[in-house]
Amino acid sequence: MPDIILVDLYIKTEMNCMKDDVIFDTNILVYAFDNSEKQKNIKAKSLVLDVQNNSINGVITNQILGELFNVLTTKVRCGITYKEASLIINDFVFSDKWHKINYTYNTVEKAAEMSWKLNKPFWDTLIIITALENNINKIYTENLKDFTEMGGIKIINPFDSSVY
């Protein structure tokens, strides 16, 4: 019979090693591929690598992938082509390191109501409701303004040096 103290210690150690799921807002992923702001690029790349190295449980949605493709091909100054952006999106889609979640019609209804009640952008409320429905309570984003007051989720700006 195993020693209860050792089993208890093992369980506590395993629990402390568990990582929270963190949803990545589009802006964080964009900075990983856009080097126009060098410090943000370095930090965002580091976070993406942390997911690849299993240090962070990274989560994305289909919406975030769509936004990422759009921003990379229309707004990023470094000139990412449609083909390059497609390859980037495919890397996320087919990676077993990134947890992919999506929303339902009910999610859209809840997000629309929250958007209206809080006077927040619909697409941001959709990300939050999708995360909460999937038991994800942390988001990496630079967009603190639009994600505040939504409740139930911890907003982390990874570019804020006081956080790390």
Image (cartoon, rainbow, N blue to C red):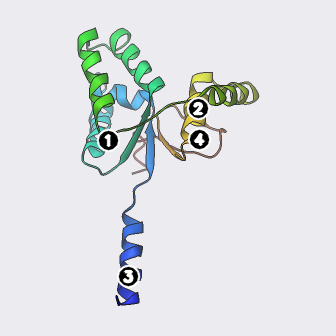
Dot 4: what SS?
helix
Q: Amino acid at mark 3?
A: Val
The crowding category of the residue bearing disc 2, from other C-alpha atoms within 10 Å (few below 14, some 14 to 19, many at least 20), is few
Q: Which residue is mark 1?
A: 47
Give the quarter of the figure containing the N terminus: bottom left
- In primary-sequence order, the first of circles 3 and 1 is 3
- In primary-sequence order, the first of circles 3 and 2 is 3
- In primary-sequence order, the first of circles 4 and 3 is 3
User: How far is mark 3 from mark 1, CA to CA?
Assistant: 33 Å
In the depicted structure, whether residue 99 falls above or below residue 67? below
Q: Which mark is residue 133?
A: 4
In terms of depth relative to the viewer, which is nearer, 162 or 63?
Answer: 63
Q: Which residue is mark 3?
A: 7
Q: Which residue is mark 2?
A: 145
Q: Name the quadrant containing residue 120.
A: top right
Q: Amino acid at mark 2?
A: Lys
